[in-house]
Amino acid sequence: MNLILASRPNVYTGSPLDRAAEKRDDDAWIQAALNHPATLFTPVWRSRNLMQGVEEGRPEAVFLTADAAAAVRMAGGPWAFLGLQGPVPVFCVDVSAADDPLPLLPAHMGTFTDLRAVAGVLANNDASVLAHARGLMHWRTRHRFCGACGAECAPRSAGHVMVCQSCGSQHFPRTDPAVIMLVTTGERALLGHSQRFPNATMYSTLAGFVEPGESLEEAVAREVFEESRVRVGSVYYHSSQPWPFPASIMLGFYAQALTEEITIDPTELRDARWFTRDQLRNHRDHGFSLPRADSIARRLIEDWIAAE
């Protein structure tokens, strides 16, 4: 199997922020940064991010200054320090408790939009920061109580740790590793149509979550066999992509098929097929569609096509 390198960065990567983890436990620095007029805030409302220019097809992230974010912060939702953009601190704040968050903002500041709806159009710098904010606020709003004893937790480390107020357990942001792989044999690649796909014609790479005590390569082989009964041999890494929808990291691989007969797991797939490069290049002419342009699945497919 020939090594196929990533042709360009994946969407949601390439953050312009220095996460500056050493600042998180400096309470005096964090408090000063929260109140500094140059500090920027990105609000999150029910997993949606604040943007302008969406209807015009030119979406941009909206970052609020400390003054503009005053009402948002007074709403009392979770917040966290994201990092430094140059010398400027950047925070995220959740405003999901408000039925309508727009009155908390200065006029004409934009709308709250699903990040996935604009990915691929939104600049990667913006997309990566908004994805970071979305993922962190998803964790904060859903992990208010201790998984060990059930007592309430309090935030520490500028929103990056939740500490149980009863037993003292520390809880950290959760990221679930998932492998996603394009299985190939010669000039053909294996794609499946998942039971979960809303698009009735879409075929994509196989994928699944890594289990405890399992290497990434083992997870690739297991998931492919469970879903299609195809055995794979050589497995090699391509690239990764943060996928905070709600809390995953996608680890992309290519895998060499050792067998070709397909028997699908009907609980996971409606169909799976081998596709030639020509069919993938001209998928619309062949009556099927490929994954969305912002996905690592699409990148795996496109880079394999280009490596002919």
Image (tube, grey):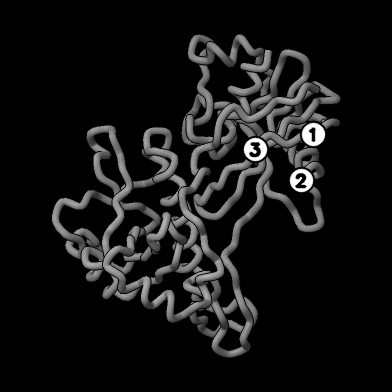
Q: Position of residue 170 (x, y in %)?
A: 61, 78
Q: Which mark is residue 235?
A: 1
Q: Position of residue 152 (x, y in %)?
A: 51, 83
Left-right relation of 31 to 198: left
Q: Residue at x 33, y 64 (%)?
A: 39
Q: Is residue 266 visible?
A: no
Q: Quadrant of residue 45?
A: bottom left
Q: Residue at x 30, y 39 (%)?
A: 59
Left-right relation of 62 to 144: left
In the displayed structure, would residue 18 be above or below residue 23?
above
Amino acid at pointer 2 = Leu
Answer few, some or many: residues within 10 Å of disc 3's Cα (few below 14, many 20 plus, some between 14 and 19). Answer: some
Left-right relation of 55 to 232: left
Camera-nearest residue between 28 and 208: 28
* Callout 1–callout 3 Cβ contact below 8 Å: no
Question: Separation of disc 1 and disc 3 at Cα?
Answer: 13 Å
Q: Nearer the viewer, mark 3 or mark 2?
A: 3
Say whether disc 3 or disc 2 marks the residue closer to the N-terminus.
2
Q: Position of residue 255 (x, y in %)?
A: 77, 30
Question: Separation of disc 3 and disc 2 at Cα?
Answer: 13 Å
According to the picture, the residue beneath numbered tag 3 turns out to be 239
Q: Position of residue 163 (x, y in %)?
A: 56, 81
Question: Separation of disc 1 and disc 2 at Cα?
Answer: 9 Å
Q: Residue at x 62, y 88 (%)?
A: 167
